[in-house]
Image: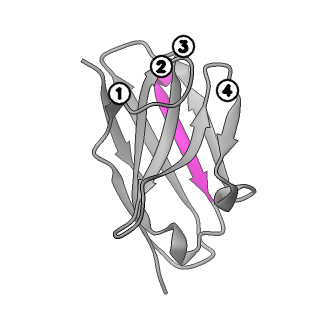
Amino acid sequence: QVQLVESGGGLVQPGGSLRLSCVVSGSTVDYWSIGWFRQAPGKEREGVSCIGSDRSASYVDSVKGRFTVSRDNAENTVYLQMNSLKPEDTALYYCATGSEYGCVEDYRGQGTQVTVSS
């Protein structure tokens, strides 16, 4: 059984930074892509970033240049460094995985809340 646990969310002022962590347990995910998604009230779920087993990364346009995804396979952990945060980044962020061919949500965590507000 694959489990994902996110941490690192919180309340931050506009322009601030947060680093989210996603610890994956129950399986070796070295060969899987892992994605970060977010869900804001009243909005569609959105894929924020995806990192492949080769550490290739992609981002949704709205976070390019501000967010950076990375992974530490030895620790089974994926990080999302979020800088220059904006109020529109406010959402529940969660990580998900399940395939080596792209970021899917076969397995997902409960999420961590990020609130950007002054």
Closer to the eye: label 1 or 3: 1
Q: Amino acid at mark 2?
A: Ser
Q: Secondary structure at mark 2?
A: strand
> Is 114 situated left or right of 55 in this image?
left
Which of the two residues, 114 or 104, is positioned nearer the viewer here? 104
Q: Amino acid at mark 1?
A: Asp
The tag earlier along the polypeptide, 4 or 1, is: 4
x and y percentages locating residue 15 in the rendered image: 63, 75
Q: What is the x, y in percent for residue 76?
A: 46, 24
Q: Which residue is mark 3?
A: 31
Mark 4 element type = loop
Tag on residue 55? 4
Can I make out residue 9 in this image? Answer: no
Q: Amino acid at mark 4?
A: Arg
**Between tags 3 and 2, which lies in front?**
2
Asked whether the residues under the numbered discs 4 and 2 touch, taking CB atoms below 8 Å apart as contact, a structural biologist would say no
How far is disc 4 from disc 3 in space, using C-alphas?
10 Å
Q: Which residue is mark 2?
A: 99
Query: CA separation, marks 3 and 2?
Result: 8 Å
